[in-house]
Image (spheres, rainbow, N blue to C red):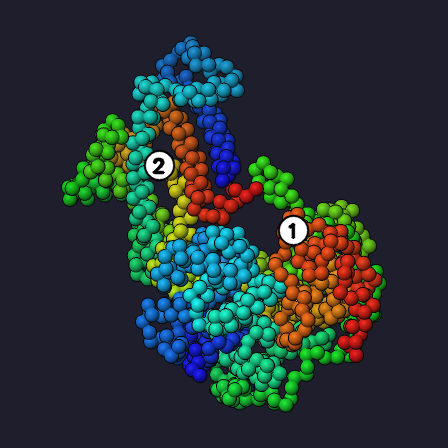
Amino acid sequence: MVRYLITRVGQALIVVILVTVIAFLILHLLPGGAARATLGKDATLAQLAQFNHDMGYDKPWIQQYLMFLQRLLHGDLGYSYQLNQSVIEAITQRLPKTIVLSLLSTLLAIVVAIPLGVIQAVRRNRWADYTITSLSLLAYATPIFFMGLLMIILFSQVWPILPPEAPQGFTVAEVLADPAGLVLPTVTLAIVTVAVYSRYVRSSMVDNLNENYVRTARSKGLPEWRVVLVHTLRNGLFPIIGLLGMYLPALFSGALVVESLFNFPGMGQLFWQAALKRDYPVLLGVTLIISIATVVGSLIADLLYAAADPRVRLRGSAS
Amino acid sequence: MEPLLELRDLDTDIAQRRGTVHALDGVSLRVMPGETLGIVGESGSGKTMTALSIMGLLPPGGQVSGGEIVFEGRDLRSLPADEVRRTRGVRMGMVFQDPLTSLNPTMRIGVQVAEPLRVHEKVGKAEARTRAVEILRRVGMPRPDKIVDNYPHELSGGMRQRVAIAMALVCSPKLLIADEPTTALDVTTQRQILELIDDLREEFSMAVILVTHDLGVIAGRADRVAVMYAGRVVETSATAALFRTPRHRYTEALLEALPEAADGERLYSIPGLPPDLSRPLTGCRFAERCRHVTDECRVTDIPLTGDAHQFACLHPVSPTDQIPSPVRVSSAPVVDAARVAGSPVLSVRNLVKNYASHGRGLRRDAGQVSAVADVSFEVAAGETFGLVGESGCGKSTLGRLAVGLERPSDGQIVLDGTDIGALSGRERRRMHREVQLMFQDSYAAMNPRMRVDSILAEPLEIQKAGDGAARRARINTLLDQVGLSRRVLERYPHEFSGGQLQRIGLARSLALQPRLIVGDEPVSALDVSIQAQVLNLMRDLQQELGLAYVFISHDLSVVDYMADRIGVMYLGKLVEVGPAREVVRAARHPYTQALIDAVPSINEVSRERIAIEGELPSALNPPTGCRFRTRCPLATSRCETEPPLAGDRHQVACHFPLRPESSAAAVQAGAVQ
């Protein structure tokens, strides 16, 4: 188990290093370079040269990369002149809030999607299955901004029970102090995820219910709920674990829209505003963080796999 | 005495997309307390559906549509669902075919075994565990107190089947249904499991329904037998009577199609295929394939008649007109000296194949899997060399090495006098014409998106043999040779039955006019009647084309029927090589003898058996010296040194051969006279 862990973390580190290389290269492929991007189109050549010299951009690429890496290790992602604060500061302010939103919506999605998928598998090809399938496809096909607007119209205007704006608090505690404001963004973000997860749960459960071991369980005269929940569910949820890891970064793209729509000061909104203002240091910083989140997500998924499936556990610990 | 279980006119339907399959049609059977009923039949006969109907475990779309299932005096069909479920869990138990997939992979053995106790008897956790250990001990599981905490993947197939049996017996049922319980296992393991079921039947005083396609398994174990064909019981009687004087023409044909019944003569092969059960059928369902059919058979619905020995046939075998004793005297020697002549086609010299074991992390040098260890043999032109052994013995690896699919770690493969290891890539490709492979699962070995004409043309195209017209002519010749009509050319692999696919596979192997065909379990997936068709075809083609075969199989009776000489493999080593009939009837190596004794036969006579215990050791770091010594009843300290393969015609690698070579030949000669 320990060896398995070390191997996987090692692999994850290699991927992260590659990500930094790519991020670094992108920074240097910017049209006009970082100097022009930062100082604007009115800057003189002398100013640009001075900027490049100050930032070390006139040194060889390898040296620049090492400097970039060194700054990165010290948590220095650059400075945003637009926000007038360091990138790392901007991110640390907003990241926790986005994490809260993502976790809440993922949790909600799982709690709803698993029972839905199980019901569909057990009642497959009957009306319950068909109804849920149709609704899932509808939810999946609806653009998230449209879903968000629909939510706002329905629950803040037609039937005004929830605020249309997310909590504006500066810290996580302040955000959580206003739970009503979190409902609409969380639900909007969760709906699409529910659609995807429940499809996966359904097909995986259908496959598993046809397995021989389920027939064996039935031959023991177990009640059907026990066959489904005790024997099949655990094996049926393995694909969802992998999906969770992959979906972590995908959730961010949803957050991008939802945060703008509900005016929630998180990573999505930060990225969106930086994109509008061409705030390259911020864009790069956010990209880097998302890349790392992707790697960490798949690492967590692998570890969860290993914890859940004894066969994987063996593969890692056999000597 | 009241029967424990009685099926009355049971009908089972399975709704499928194409229509409803009438899997069972009026099946009536009874099982007395404590007896073993064997249900035998080919695939699609309804034997498994009968078992699943009793257990209420029919696949999706399946339902019992008529008749009664009376168990312990109550019709299960009229009981409430919960009561049926409890009956199934407590009073009945079922063991399935494939032990590798029949256990929940993520649940500990002990939890799975004790689950019926927890559910039906509301037993506490600690007691459930104690009783799981107890029942595992009774099914012969070594170290049961450790095994309860293991997961299924940590056990071998045979051990998992023991777990499955323990699970079925944990509530002490009165009826155990075993559906092909040993089909996925090796013969030596099969014997252990069948004997275990026999012992447990007495210990638990329960009845057993043994469902199988293998007549040999039934012959040795069942009190009574029911023969099923196309969803009906066609004959039922006491076991001995059925094998001595079969009455139904299907049973007769089935027994004649067994390779062990042939003894060198041509097998009887039942023509055609079983009927499609989704269509309405009238008359005897075997009529289309029967030698004795009359017009009456096709229109009359024939009920089971008779008292103790029932059968449904208008033209039954007369009880005095017995089929010839399976041990027949062959008129001609099997090895035809004129056919087997000249220099060897294939000569394997000191062949070694090791695979690197997948070492993990820091211990990459975890060792080597020794798949083939210093094996030498020759195959003469026109000869059939049979390779037998249990799974994992290296016989398939040897076959793949012989056709050049894998490169040997050491040693030589000489084809027609040329060492293929010394050839360049292009020359090696040319040599491939001479030796072709035939697979067990022909469907998996064909591209499902290619039509048969492309499948057959491909080898010719790759080897750039002839122009388009010549290739078409060649393909037509091939179809004639394997007995298929030209119409098959436009069809796809999924449209064919197993036997037809095997013919297409054979045609493909023959396309380049090879001198040697390596058949890796070519008939193992086929039913007995179809198997006979393919075996006969292979023999005919050998006569016609002078082919040599390396015939790889785990089934000794098939190899005995097909081969001129047999090589027996154990854990990568060739332990015995000799003329087929001598090896089978006068084995010299203790392993060969144990293997022969383990094969269930329709002639179950008491004989002195060499029973081997335990399971095949790992080929990763195999035992030193004689590799069989860890399981051999005759082993002494001398066996720690490796015995060479010694002898003249009938070689053996053993320090203590069961008989000297001269005596082996004499025993064989005696058997023929």
Residue at 47% across / 22% down in the picture?
Answer: A69
Which element type, helix, strand or loop, lies under badge 2? helix
Mark 2 vs mark 1, CA separation in Å? 52 Å
Quadrant of the image containing the C terminus of chain A: top right
Residue in the foreground of this view, choosing between B80 and B255: B80
Amino acid type at circle 2 is Ser
Residue ID at (39%, 32%)? A290
User: Where's residue A250, x and y in %?
Assistant: 37, 39
The front one of B120 and B543 is B120
Which chain letter matches label 1? B
- B211 displayed left or right of A233: right
Indicate the chain on which mark 2 is placed.
Answer: A
Q: Residues within 10 Å of mark 1 (few under 14, many from 20)?
A: many
A12 above or below A79?
A: below
The verdict on a common chain for dots 2 and 1 is no
Q: Residue B619 carries which label?
A: 1
Q: Mark 2 points at which residue?
A: A253
Left or right, B53 with reference to B250: left
Q: Which of B542 and B492 is in front in this view?
A: B542
**In this view of the protein, can residue B392 be seen by the observer?**
yes
